[in-house]
Amino acid sequence: MVTRTAIVLDDIQGQAGTIPLDITLEEIAVANIPGLVYWPYINDIYGRVPGSSPQALYDRLTDDALTTVASPSFSIGALPDSSPAVIIGSQNTSWRATVPEFNKGATFAAKIANTVGISSNSAPADSTFWIMDDGAGRLTFRVGSYTWAASNYDGPTLTPGTAVAVIFRIDALTGTVTLRVGGSYTKIVQDDVMRSAALHPNFQFGLVNNEGSLTSRFGNYGHLLAFDNAISDADMDAVLEMM
């Protein structure tokens, strides 16, 4: 006689003893994107590493402890749409990570309101990269020696009352940067100068380091994501669907 065991992967309405998984189909799609290297689980109940010093969040894929730059503690708040976010209020509470190297490109994403800052950390000129708002809700970025001015930005203006997803994709093979803001704006910028950028393997959220010149972009950041390559358009769609 064979004994069979049923494994329930989702709650069954009206049946006691079953519980829903804490994951959605949209999150599963993002988890399957090649090159996902950084994905903090921003959640007070399940996300924090108990007893960690400094306090930390788990990475959703690896269970690694992800910590702030220097602070022993941090806070979890919310964006205007009530989705959870880490509160970055100082240089020490910015979030930093390292990859061995980027594979001829990189992609970063965050859900924010009126301010965003994502950058390499203390990188030399040829490997610097950053994206931030100009203080008036327009995006500007730098990759290597190439800088794109905020005056060229014609997308939706970041405002305090609206949560929006921002995706910053660098493709060093083609010398291309793609910006996705929300579900309606896409901007592709191409310049061969960006082909020579050797992207620095340290990156951070909430603070922009432009060859040692620091610019703070403190605020609430949700859905922090980093990939070690230039992900596909379809994968960017999947990230936006999750956000």
Image (cartoon, rainbow, N blue to C red):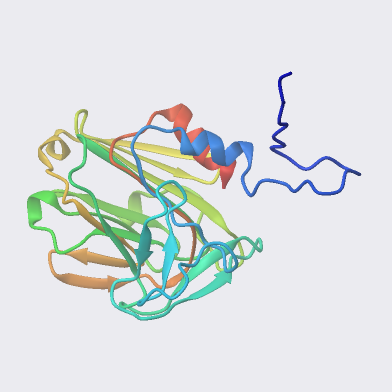
Q: Image height check: is 83 above or below 156?
A: below
* Residue 214: x %, y % from top left: 22, 72
Q: Which residue lies furthest to the top in this view?
A: 1
| Horizontal arrangement in the rendering, residue 84 relative to residue 220 (left or right) | right
Q: Which residue lies furthest to the right in this view?
A: 14
- Report the residue at 62% width, 36% height from top: 25
Can the viewer see residue 117 in this picture?
yes
Q: Which of 216 and 226 is in front in this view?
A: 226
Can the viewer see residue 148 in this picture?
no
Q: Image height check: is 177 above or below 142?
A: above
Q: Image height check: is 123 above or below 167?
A: below
* Residue 186: x %, y % from top left: 45, 38
Q: Nearer the viewer, residue 156 or 116?
A: 116
| Horizontal arrangement in the rendering, residue 12 relative to residue 79 (left or right) | right
Q: Which of 235 and 16 is in front in this view?
A: 16
Q: Nearer the viewer, residue 203 or 215?
A: 203
Q: In which quarter of the image is the N terminus?
A: top right
Q: Image height check: is 161 above or below 98?
A: below
* Residue 184: x %, y % from top left: 55, 40
* Residue 168: x %, y % from top left: 36, 46
- Report the residue at 88% width, 43% height from top: 15
Number of numbered discs: 0
- Report the residue at 44% width, 64% height from top: 57
Q: Which residue lies furthest to the front in this view?
A: 1
- Report the residue at 47% width, 38% height from top: 31
